[in-house]
């Protein structure tokens, strides 16, 4: 029997690449997104259901999960991929952006997971894969909100691993490095106020470094391959890095103390 993956944020980037990768591997795919018309190319594929889901809308989460179960009979893997990056000067960031960062990256992930757990619990099987980031293990300047949200994903996933294991449900974390996606475009929201002159040197150096990282980022298919490994390796492994930069930086973080590591990042950023 074909297995089924349920993906949030499947209209672009990692989510889109993963939907295509799993389809090519013979899986059923439930590709969810805020605007289903963005998934027209998937809608024509056999074994793919494109439907609406906005992680900030509770009704849409439950509706998409129910539709997916009715369409394919069972969901085997949940990929919590939908994400949003709020960067910039904390002092210049409106509170509505602060709230939205955590609503999308943390609360939406939690609510989607809660909504699918009765299905996984009833079948005593299933895998929850949460897209974190190397930014859930290490930080860069001006990423207070984004890193805060991804550190939260790391912690809740690790704890949930204990909670769901006796139920036959696995929890996995995928930690991509810099990926060449639209994250730096429509999913990247930068807050700055030029009148706060004390911060502008950090802002200019961060933007230069971020542009360089994005241009050298891995293709989203690199992450899709790691997600497939996490979904199919049959192990209880919790964390998977995706991209050579993520593997290198996360390894360095384990080896160095705070003073050494933070000084190294600051130096790389020219600070």
Image: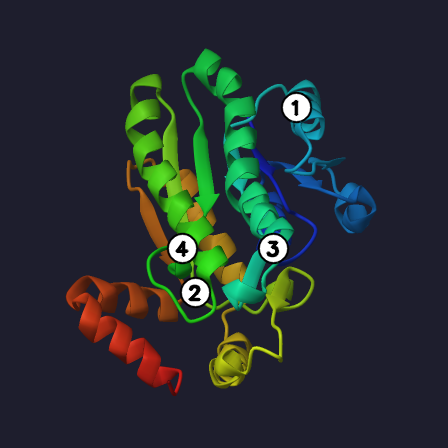
For label 1, the SS is helix
| Residue 22 coordinates in the image, percent (x, y) | 57, 45
Question: What residue is pinned by disc 4?
Answer: 175
Instruction: Tell which of 107 and 66 is nearer to you.
Output: 107
Q: CA distance from mark 3 to mark 1?
A: 24 Å
Distance between mark 3 and mark 2 Cα atoms? 16 Å
Whole-number angstrom distance, CA of label 1 to CA of label 4: 27 Å
- Which callout, 3 or 2, points to the residue nearer the camera? 2
C-alpha separation, residue under disc 4 versus residue under disc 3: 16 Å
**Residue 23, x across and y down, in percent:** 62, 44
The residue that appears at 57% across and 60% down in the rendered structure is: 86
Mark 2 surroundings: few (<14), some (14-19) or many (≥20) residues within 10 A? many
SS label for mark 2: loop
In the rendered structure, the answer to whether residue 158 lies left or right of residue 221 reads left
Position of residue 42 relative to residue 127, above or below, is below
* Above or below: residue 146 compared with residue 159: below
Residue, disc 2: 177
Tell me which label, 1 or 4, sits earlier in the chain: 1
- Disc with the residue nearer the chain's start (3 vs 1): 3
Q: Residue at x 35, y 21 (%)?
A: 168
Please state which of residues 35 and 19 is positioned toward the viewer in this rendering. 35
Q: Earlier in the sequence, mark 3 or mark 2?
A: 3
Instruction: Work out whether mark 2 precedes mark 1 in sequence or the reverse, and give the earlier one.
Output: 1
Q: Quadrant of the N terminus?
A: top right
- Label 1: which residue? 62
Q: Which mark is residue 17?
A: 3
Q: Are marks 1 and 4 in contact (CB under 8 Å)?
A: no
Q: Mark 4 and mark 2 in contact? Answer it, CB < 8 Å.
A: yes
């Amino acid at each position: 029997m074909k297995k089924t993956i349920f993906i949030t944020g499947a209209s672009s980037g990692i989510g889109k690449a993963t939907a295509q990768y799993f389809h090519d591997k013979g899986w059923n795919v439930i590709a969810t997104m805020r605007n289903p018309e963005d998934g027209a190319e998937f809608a024509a594929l056999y074994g793919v259901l494109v439907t609406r889901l906005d992680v900030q809308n509770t009704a849409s989460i439950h509706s998409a999960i129910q539709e997916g179960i009715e369409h394919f009979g069972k969901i085997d893997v949940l990929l919590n991929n939908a994400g949003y990056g709020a960067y910039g000067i904390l002092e210049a960031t409106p509170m509505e952006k602060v709230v939205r960062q955590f609503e999308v990256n943390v609360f939406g992930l939690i609510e989607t997971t809660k909504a699918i757990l009765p299905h996984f619990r009833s079948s005593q099987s299933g895998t929850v894969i949460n897209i974190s980031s190397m930014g859930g293990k290490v930080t860069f300047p001006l990423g207070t909100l984004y890193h805060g949200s991804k550190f939260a994903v790391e912690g809740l996933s690790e704890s949930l691993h204990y909670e769901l294991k006796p139920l036959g449900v696995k929890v996995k974390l995928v930690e991509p490095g810099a990926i060449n996606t639209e994250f730096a475009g429509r999913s990247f929201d930068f807050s700055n106020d030029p009148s706060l002159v004390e911060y502008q040197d950090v802002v200019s150096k961060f933007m230069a470094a971020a542009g360089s990282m994005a241009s050298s980022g891995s293709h989203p298919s690199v992450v899709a391959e790691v997600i497939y490994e996490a979904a199919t390796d049959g192990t209880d492994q919790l964390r998977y890095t995706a991209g050579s930069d993520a593997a290198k930086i996360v390894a360095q973080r384990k080896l160095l103390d705070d003073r050494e590591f933070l000084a190294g990042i600051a130096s790389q950023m020219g600070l």
